[in-house]
Image (spheres, coloured by chain):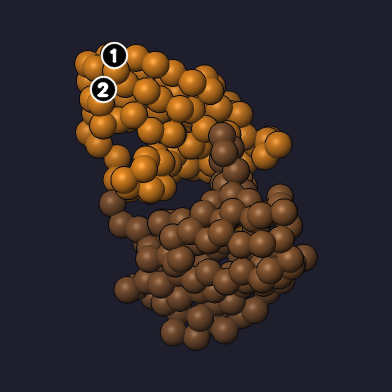
Chain colours: A orange, B brown
Amino acid sequence: DSGVTQTPKHLITATGQRVTLRCSPRSGDLSVYWYQQSLDQGLQFLIQYYNGEERAKGNILERFSAQQFPDLHSELNLSSLELGDSALYFCASSGGGGTEAFFGQGTRLTVV
Amino acid sequence: GQQLNQSPQSMFIQEGEDVSMNCTSSSIFNTWLWYKQDPGEGPVLLIALYKAGELTSNGRLTAQFGITRKDSFLNISASIPSDVGIYFCAGRGATNKLIFGTGTLLAVQP
């Protein structure tokens, strides 16, 4: 158990819909990262938050957004969903100071 | 999105054999990481490398940070069935973002 909790574990939704994925980082970790894993693109960095502020942005679509709340949990919002958004979405957290991130178990999103 | 070249793509070996895999990049990295991912789980960090030429071991696993800073290698000695999984390299450069490799699927026959 990495200590990073993601909910839900599985999500099935229709095209055009909007979903929210939730992540609780390890206790004390200030950084949260979101990654997307698909068969054709592999593991891709989406976005990083540090203590509530956006720190870095990767290949995140404009239809996707994220935020980190004062209690440090984070949410990834995916809207106007397309079939190609079906993927595993991972959250990872780190404490900063050069420590590497621990990954959660992921949310498997299926868009039908 | 960008991915690092990782080879081989898959390996099917007998228990007890040694395994080698590598990762190459067109960019220079300051950090190389190796992860293992089991089905239905997130990647788990195995080894972290922070200096060119660095050789680091974690049990039966040994990884090296290439001198050119554009490659890294992972060796697994005396493989066992629980080594089965997908191994990913990841590199971090000046942008401070992690870029992952394409993955190596390892299957171990008891």
Q: Callout 2: helix, strand or loop?
A: loop
Dots 2, 1 in contact, CB < 8 A: yes
Q: Which residue is mark 2?
A: A81
Q: Which quarter of the rendered picture does the C terminus of chain A lie within?
A: top left
Q: Looking at the picture, which amino acid does disc 1 mark?
A: Ala
Answer whether residue B33 is visible to the viewer in this image: yes
Q: Looking at the picture, does residue B63 appear above or below residue A61?
A: below
Q: What element does badge 1 sit on? A: loop
The amino acid type of the residue labelled 2 equals Leu
Task: Report the side of A82 relative to A104 (left or right).
Answer: left
Mark 2 and mark 1: span between their CA atoms?
7 Å
- Residue in the picture at 41% in, 56% down: B102
**x, y (%) of residue A38?**
37, 40
Residue B22: image location, x then y, percent = 49, 71
Vertical position of residue B42 compared to residue B91: above or below: above
Which badge, 2 or 1, comes first in the chain's sequence? 1
Task: Quickly name the residue at label 1.
Answer: A14
How far from the left and from the top, in percent, is residue B101? 42, 59
Q: Residues within 10 Å of mark 1 (few under 14, many from 20)?
A: few
Residue positioned 60% across, 43% down in the render: B38
> Which residue is pictured at 50% across the width and 85% down the height?
B67
Q: As drawn, is A57 to the left or to the right of B78?
A: left
